[in-house]
Image (tube, rainbow, N blue to C red):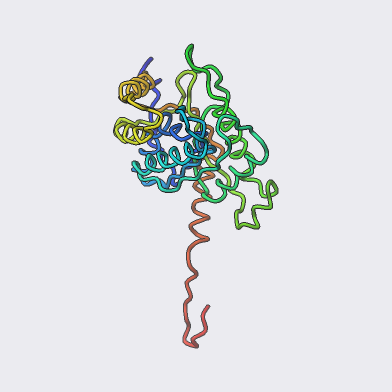
Amino acid sequence: MSDAELRKDDGYIPARAMFIVAHPDDIEFGCAGTAARWKAGGAEVAYVLVTSGDVGIDEPGMTRERAAQIRETEQTEAAAEIGVTDVTFLREPDGTVVNTLDLRRRLVREIRRFKPEAVVTFDPTAMFISEAYVNHPDHRAVGVAAVDAVFPASGQPLVFSELEQEGLNAHKVRKLFVVSFNGPGSTVVDISDTLEDKLRSLRKHKSQLAEWDPEKTVREWASNAAKDTPHEFVESYRVVTMITDEEWEKRSVQRATESEPAIETEIESGVPI
């Protein structure tokens, strides 16, 4: 592959980014390097966890309630490692997530609340990740629900219009980042400077890692994803841009103008004009 064909990180950093996944540790395994990169670049970042991973601890005597407490604590600590404090748990039942209209509404509520420029989620079309791994059905269900919430639901005022009663008006997301599982995505985020942040964050999930050190595996994943790029480590995505740069710039100027305070000038009579 020639230099002209290299998959490069274009340096894009959204003003606000929301990561929507199924379980605690999904972000850390899949895209925490990106979250750390964007956070370091000045982005506001929010995490939405559809479940609390309440069936994810296989120990004698463990209950769903206790497992949820453990994993929510681990996720909150993992997010804090890269400076993310906006963490929401929807507490859908782990292992049996279904892409319902109610789940879509709940995700639209979070999108309209946070108003992200970019949303990151997992590829809902990926069934067989490798010859050793079938993609978790929760990942697929949440991926579809997140995509449906991003477009068109969150941006259409007449869809879930009842949310306006909560002060949550329609919001159009600019970019959708879908974590690439099957083959390299066309867009990469260079995480060479944030791989250690990703690892520190991942290690907070002690209930999932036990005695296993994920560093070798995570480095291999990020290095393999970086093939045909000029970077050492990357996370790879398929990106859908729903609002062009030109249109986004127009909207940004409009928003800035609308938010500027009115300037009153007084004439000799003292009457403001």
Q: Position of residue 201 (x, y in %)?
A: 35, 36
In the image: residue 13, left or right of residue 270: left
Foreground pick, 223 / 28:
28
Tell me: residue 133, above or below residue 138: above
| Residue farthest to the bottom, as pictured | 269
Q: Quadrant of the N terminus?
A: top left
Q: Position of residue 104 (x, y in %)?
A: 63, 40
Tell me: residue 38, above or below residue 251: above
Q: Give the quarter of the image for residue 139.
A: top right
Q: Position of residue 19 (x, y in %)?
A: 48, 39
Q: Say which residue appears at 55% left-offset and 42% top-offset.
A: 90
Foreground pick, 64 / 1:
64
| Residue farthest to the right, as pictured | 158
In the image: residue 135, left or right of residue 34: right
In the image: residue 54, left or right of residue 220: right
Foreground pick, 125 / 94:
94
Q: Position of residue 70 (x, y in %)?
A: 43, 39
Q: Say which residue appears at 50% left-offset and 61% top-offset.
A: 259
Q: Give the quarter of the image for residue 202.
A: top left
